[in-house]
Image (cartoon, rainbow, N blue to C red):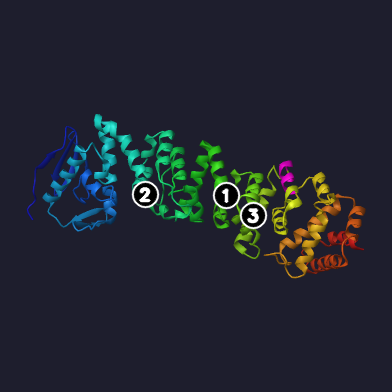
Amino acid sequence: MMEIKNLEFKINNYLTLKLENDNTIIYILGVKYRQCKSLLLETTTEKLKTDKNIDSIDEAAEILDKSIGYWQGDHFIYKIPPETEFWGHCSNIQVWYEQDYDTRLLHSNLAFPLLKELSDIGDTLAKRKFKEEIALRLESGFIPTTMFLVLNGYLRYLSREEIKTILESLPTFPPNSHTGKVFQLFPDEPPYFDENELYFLMEHPVIRLLEGIAETGDVGGDFEEWMRLCLSTLLEKCPTYLKERLLMFLGKCRIRDFTHLFNLGIMEYVSFEQFISILLFKNTELYEDFIQIDGDYVYGRILNEFREFFYTMEDRGSEAIDRRVIEILESASIEDIKLIIMFYLIEGLSLENLTFCVMSPKIRLIDKILSFIKGLNEGGAVRGVNPETWFFIRLINIIYLITTNLDKDLLISSFRQQSKKTMVSFRQSLNNIEKSELYPAAKIDILRQLVV
């Protein structure tokens, strides 16, 4: 095929297209800018309006037949002559200019860099349209375009208030609309995001970055480090927002997502009291998950790590937590009691509050613990509990804690008020633990004094 040379088309005082070596090249003020890589179709704003399912060239590229060519690596191979391709590009960019740089009329990967360059060199129309077009395309809700703008730093030209306005304009999607597929649009090494970009990604009704991180789970490598960087950036720049957002998420997540966030170290941003409050009074599904995890090795390991993490925190045993535990003991079911035992909340009580729980006729802590032990010995009256697990040891240890911190004669009197069947069950428990060697023999000897 004979090569066609010296084709040139002037769009305006800033833009010129030239055909060079069968490639269409864009020039800005006479300086080579970039090659036009692909030609999808020629269109106008009016044509877009006639198809309710297509709002931009980006969307058209997702669904239209690529009959004019195909991609081979980073290059688009055309089935049409270079001259025809050249005039197609000229027509598209001419229409784009005539329609006040409407970015829907070109691929985003050309429209926005080109509009930014024109704005920087002094094109007054481009200056006026640049931020407006960013906002309009974000408001369209088309995720590939949205992610292009985010990943290429275009949100940095908008203020936090402008971002909030865009988010408010987006339609509300069902809570389960997030599938994690958005993360497929991230490169292997995602860029650093500032706090406004992270805020947008967190609050976007489809992207929902925090939920996406939780759903993605243990990915390892650079991507996991990027997730940690996102969280640390938010903690540094807007800690109040991050904590509030985490509390909102914890109020509706399940244990799988909670586990992923815990592995990323995110729970250190939430106080123990806040988490316990959510678990016991707001998120019934996560509560049920925790109730039933005995016997699951993976979640059991996470729970052990989680308990140990909070057990060393400074607010362990705070008066506010103690009050909450007392409220639970006064009114809760046997499974609620199981949960506060799982999190060492009874051991964390101050001596004064522990005494109150033992002496209170409304709580009768000794009765509750012995009833628990009796139920376990009778065949697992409580869901998810096996007498051979650590939970059984926790119950015995609470009795030991009470024995060594309160008046022993008072406790012996309390034990003597129990039924014969309950006492037989307690003795059996001590014998079983002694045989298993899961609990110190010296402590077992002290506990036996209660049922002499």
Q: Quadrant of residue 111?
A: top left
The magenta segment: 318-325
Judge from the rendering whether residue 113 lies leftward or rightward of residue 424; answer left or right: left
Q: Name which residue lies at 29% across and 40% down.
A: 112
Query: Compared to 86, does 369 lie above or below?
Result: below
In this view of the protein, which residue sits in the foreground, 129 or 299? 129
Q: Is residue 323 magenta?
A: yes
Residue depicted at x 73% and y 56% = 337
- Residue 346 appears in the picture as rendered: no
The part of the image, by quadrant, that contains residue 131 is: top left
Is residue 174 in view? yes
Residue type indicated by callout 2: Ile
Q: Residues within 10 Å of mark 3 (few under 14, many from 20)?
A: some
Q: Quarter of the image containing the C terminus?
A: bottom right
Residue 120 percent coordinates (x, y): 28, 31
Q: Are marks 3 and 2 in contact (CB under 8 Å)?
A: no
Q: Which residue position is annotated with label 1?
A: 250
Q: Which residue in the structure is indicated by mark 2? A: 143
Secondary element at tag 2: helix
Q: Position of residue 249 (x, y in %)?
A: 54, 48
Residue 334 vertical position relative to residue 103 in the rendered view, above or below: below
Q: Principal SS element in the magenta part? A: helix
The residue at which mark 3 appears reads as 305
| Nearer to the camera, 405 or 325 | 325
Q: Secondary structure at mark 1?
A: helix
Q: Tell me the distance, in whole angstroms, between the alpha carbons under discs 2 and 1.
A: 26 Å
The label on residue 411 is: none
